[in-house]
Image (spheres, rainbow, N blue to C red):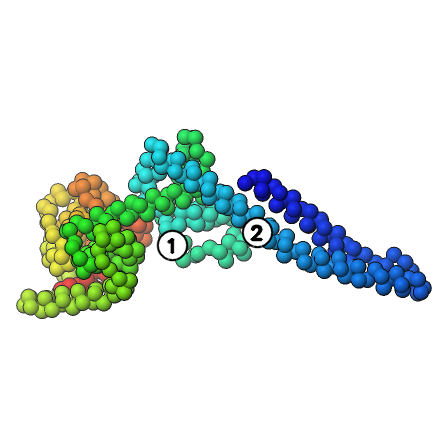
Amino acid sequence: MIKKLNKIRLIIVLLITLDIFAFIIFAMPPIVEEGTGFSIIIYEVIRPIKFLFATIGILLLPIIFYLYDLVNKIKIEDRKLFFEKEKNKLISSGDYKIIKNFVSKYKTILPKNIYKYYIFIKHKSHKKFTIFTILTTDFTSVLEYKNAINIYHITKLQTLINSKGFNFSIKDICSLIDREKQIQEYDDFKTKMLFNDPKGLEDYIKNLIEIYGENYIEYREFLRSLLKSKKVEFSDYGLIDIANFKKKMELDRFEKDLESKEPYFVSMEEVDLFTGYDFEYFLNTLFKKMSYSVEHTKLSGDQGADLIVSKLGEKIIVQAKRHTSKISNKAVQEVVASIKHFKADKGMVVTNNYFTNSAIELAESNNIELIDRDMLSKLIEKYL
């Protein structure tokens, strides 16, 4: 491959030299004085030769560009083959566990495209924002990057892996992280989806909506893969029609709620009048309406957990905060600590108020879900 590249490079150099020579010939002034009959004859002979060289020079340009592009494609293909070889070598070795452990530790703060994020932060830290980087950067991801992983950890990972006898570039390392992140996300998706042993397509779609709510569309490809692996018959139309299935589920829930004969009596203004204990019991009822199983912890010594709710194999710690002022990051800290104590999967803070910026930032970096006044109002309207 290297010999082939060197040959093409040599051809490019020769063609560029010939091209420059052709344009020099075209640009040369007449070598004889004007005004004599002889000079006119010479000029008439030289002129078509000059235009011939100009034509040759113009025709050589696309050939040079093509060969240059060919060299780049060969280099990229060669790099891909090398990466695949190194990747397979890493996966077959015991050292791949380093990538697995890295993703497990930092997956809650890993952005969607690690390499794009790495380049963005590199340019930002070196203040190298050119017109090109501004045009090619997806600035809608800037908010996602706000609490993302420090790129120092990615470079340290590269150093660690390469110290084991490998030769991965930063881009290679980012590809490995993206690959493992997707594997772990799919495994997590699979565990949640199969918790209640779904049988047919309708059961799978119901689980998808129950677990992921409004974000179900982000998991359609995972669902497609899972259905294929379980040999469940489905059509693309059936997957596209998930939105209609979701509407049907909501209507069925509404009809069932009408039959329950329980009066609708809760408004946010009434919630504001609850005591802290009343608010906890109110959330107990709300989560049961949302098809969660609910365990109400002791009113004292609850280790930062007011409720422990579960659905489809996912265990969630809930901290209830009825306050007249914004909720600080202390509530988030308490939930983070209680997740480990109760061996839960995630945490949530629910309030009738709003959250401070520091609480939001801490929640984002620790994968804690925040339900503020507006979101709570929507849940009350939907389920109570």
Query: What is the x, y in percent for residue 3?
Result: 58, 39
- Which mark is first along the chain, 1 or 2? 2
Q: Is residue 157 left or right of residue 44?
A: left
Query: What kind of residue is marked 1?
Result: Leu
Q: What element carries label 1?
A: helix
Query: What is the x, y in percent for residue 174?
Result: 41, 44
| Residue hosting label 2 | 69
Confirm whether residue 66 shows in the render.
yes
Query: What is the x, y in percent for residue 51?
Result: 77, 61
Quote the CA–CA distance across marks 2 and 1: 36 Å
Query: What is the x, y in percent for residue 311?
Result: 16, 52
Query: What kind of residue is marked 2?
Result: Asp
- Looking at the rendered image, the disc whose residue lies closer to the viewer, 2 or 1, is 2
Looking at the picture, does residue 85 appear above or below residue 271?
Answer: above
Q: Residue furthest left?
A: 261
**Closer to us: 261 or 211:** 211
Location of residue 52 by image quarter: bottom right
Quarter holding the C terminus? Answer: bottom left
Location of residue 266 by image quarter: bottom left
Q: Residue 143 carries which label?
A: 1
